[in-house]
Amino acid sequence: MIGPVIAAGANNLPYSIPIHPNLVHLTLGLFIVAIGFDIVGALFPLEKRVFKFLAIPATRSNLFDVGWYNMVAAAIITFFTVAAGFYEILMADMSAEGVSDWGLGFKDTMIWHGLGGVLILTMIVVMSIWRGFQRYVWRQDRARQVQWSYLLVGLLVFALMFAQGTLGAHLGGEFGVHVTADQLLRSGASPNQL
């Protein structure tokens, strides 16, 4: 006997709700907070008066701490996000037809979304390493812990995340990939059965 067969749920997954979309939002939140706090830290001399006026006890080093720890967490979580995405797309129904708003078919959208995920994972890991060098080696004794070029690349990654998210939204919204209610309705079951 090979082992017990795991019953597939509405999404053809061995669990009822897809994991990838939840991890995507965790990755996004961690990365956005990391870059956002580093931008606020870099602009701290300009914003110091605002913090003082609002009686917010912020220090520049604390802002950079938040940026650093969120970037490290984003790099770790993104490995799981990409892994879950590849696992779940392998379990997807490949018979989806039609084209997305961008004129791509299901398989092309899936391939571009997968490649984009790997690219963003790579960029987040590289940015985490770059951020670590800035924090502990290159800019250790400077008030501004991050380089402007680092922040600019972070904003570029935001744009890539937007494109990546749009491809993922096409997979779910236009092709019905791993949208639980959509899959249940297509199979004739009730979405209320969860």
Image (cartoon, rainbow, N blue to C red):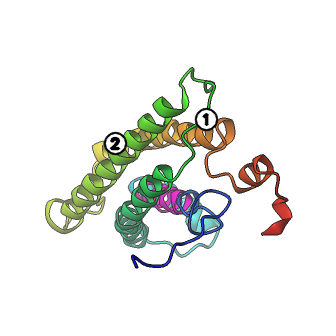
Dot 1 falls on a residue whose secondary structure is loop
- Residue at x-position 22% and y-position 55%: 130
Dot 2 falls on a residue whose secondary structure is helix
- Residue at x-position 51% and y-position 53%: 91
Badge 1 amino acid = Ala
Closer to the chain start, of discs 2 and 1, is 1
Return the residue nearer the eye: 130 or 42: 130
Residue span colored magenta: 23-41
Sort mark 2 into few (<14), some (14-19) or many (20+) by Cα contacts within 10 Å: some
The answer to whether residue 146 shows anywhere in this view is no
Residue farthest front in this picture = 1
Q: Nearer the viewer, mark 2 or mark 1?
A: 1
- Left or right of residue 149: residue 91: right
Magenta stretch prevailing secondary structure: helix
- Residue at x-position 60% and y-position 64%: 8
- Left or right of residue 89: residue 153: left
Image quadrant in which the N terminus is located: bottom left
Residue 97 within the magenta-colored segment of the rendering? no
The answer to whether residue 125 shows anywhere in this view is yes
Residue position for label 1: 96
Cα separation between marks 2 and 1: 35 Å
Badge 2 amino acid = Val
Return the residue nearer the eye: 138 or 23: 23
Return the residue nearer the eye: 142 or 158: 158
* x, y percent for residue 127: 29, 53
Residue farthest left in this picture = 137
Image quadrant in which the C terminus is located: bottom right
* x, y percent for residue 182: 74, 49
Residue 26 within the magenta-colored segment of the rendering? yes
Residue position for label 2: 153
Residue farthest top in this picture = 103
- Left or right of residue 142: residue 178: right
